[in-house]
Image: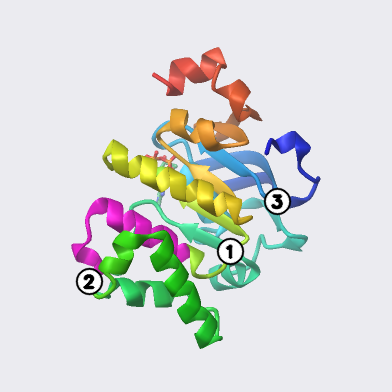
């Protein structure tokens, strides 16, 4: 479904957001809007501020100024666990699974904000159906999984908090093409279940193929935004990000 045919319900609105690391200004007054049910991609070169944007939304880093509205809540000064409670899950760059815990325990930890054990067990089972590779490896230590399997676990773990908005940071990084296709088809499946997705990708071509809309981030500023099908044929995007 295209962005313009969706009901106009804004799930996330970032207004004039500034983030500094010490003296370095990583984000400069960025504005971003996501409608419920959309897949929106954020593309940009190394160091542009993509990860920082996701961290600011999930409150892993604090913003200097600006406002973040989520589902009608002003979450600008909330803490990470509070935004998880409100329905935002962050699948971080580099996967960050708990290496010394099993696949099963990683999934269980993803549900730490939930209390209904029967529902949690049923959802873990659902993840195993979605990710058969994880099912076969449920008792394996996460640190011994392959890169692609760790990425699947990182996504499945994020989904265990039952998010309405999923922040995905570079899910295809370093993975072989066949695994990348598998990961992207999982992202498509998640979208079909109604999860809204903000996708950061180095593979801009692939990201723009599945996204409704995109934003281009350059040195901490949004320089271009539009419908994905238009961005993919934009000369500036082609030249800088599509090789
Ligand atoms: N913890 C930190 N302390 C200081 N500076 C940081 C920190 N994290 C990021 N930065 C700086 O902020 C800027 C944006 O970094 P960020 O990680 O958001 O970029 P990115 O677009 O995700 O890049 P990449 O594609 O390489 O992942 C960079 O200049 C980076 O050096
Ligand atoms: Mg990054």
| Residue at x 34% of width, y 75% of height | 104
Q: Look at the magenta stretch and give its main secondary structure.
A: helix
Task: Give the residue at the far top of this rendering.
Answer: 235
Residue 152 placement: quadrant = bottom left
Q: Which residue is mark 2?
A: 141
Q: Is residue 121 above or below residue 240?
A: below
Mark 1 burial class by Cα count in 10 Å: few <14, some 14-19, many 20+:
many
Alpha carbon separation for disc pair 3 and 2: 36 Å
Circles 1 and 2, Cβ within 8 Å, touching? The answer is no
Q: Tell me where residue 90 appears, x and y as whole percent.
A: 49, 59
Front residue of 165/72: it is 165
- Residue 153 among those drawn in magenta: yes
Asked if one can make out residue 97 in the rendered structure from this viewpoint, the answer is: no
| Residue at x 39% of width, y 18% of height | 243
Instruction: Say what secondary structure mark 1 lies in.
Output: loop
In primary-sequence order, the first of circles 1 and 3 is 3
Question: Is 50 left, or right, of 137 in this rendering?
Answer: right
Q: Which residue is mark 3?
A: 36
Image: magenta residue range? 140-158
Front residue of 171/32: it is 171
- Quadrant assignment for the N terminus: top right
Alpha carbon separation for disc pair 1 and 3: 12 Å
Q: Which residue is mark 1?
A: 163
Circles 3 and 2, Cβ within 8 Å, touching? The answer is no
């Amino acid at each position: 479904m295209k962005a313009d045919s969706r009901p106009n319900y804004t799930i996330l609105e970032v207004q004039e957001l500034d983030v500094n690391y010490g003296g370095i200004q990583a984000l400069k007054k960025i504005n971003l809007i996501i409608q419920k049910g959309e897949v929106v991609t954020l593309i940009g070169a190394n160091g542009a501020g993509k990860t920082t944007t996701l961290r600011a939304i999930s409150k892993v880093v604090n913003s200097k100024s600006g406002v973040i509205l989520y589902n009608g809540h002003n979450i600008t000064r909330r803490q990470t666990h509070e935004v998880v409670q409100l329905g935002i899950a962050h699948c971080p760059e580099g996967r960050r699974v708990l290496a010394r815990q099993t696949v099963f325990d990683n999934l269980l930890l993803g549900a730490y904000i939930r209390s209904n054990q029967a529902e949690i067990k049923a959802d873990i089972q659902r993840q195993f159906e979605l990710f058969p590779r994880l099912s076969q490896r449920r008792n394996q230590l996460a640190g011994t999984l392959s890169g692609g399997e760790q990425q699947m676990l990182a996504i499945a773990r994020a989904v265990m908090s039952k998010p309405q908005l999923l922040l995905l940071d570079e899910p295809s990084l370093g993975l072989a093409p066949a695994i990348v296709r598998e990961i992207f088809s999982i992202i498509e499946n998640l979208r079909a279940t109604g999860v809204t997705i903000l996708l950061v990708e180095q593979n801009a071509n692939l990201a723009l193929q599945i996204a409704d809309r995109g934003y281009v981030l350059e040195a901490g500023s949004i320089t271009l935004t539009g419908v994905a099908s238009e961005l993919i044929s934009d000369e500036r995007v082609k030249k800088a990000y599509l090789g």
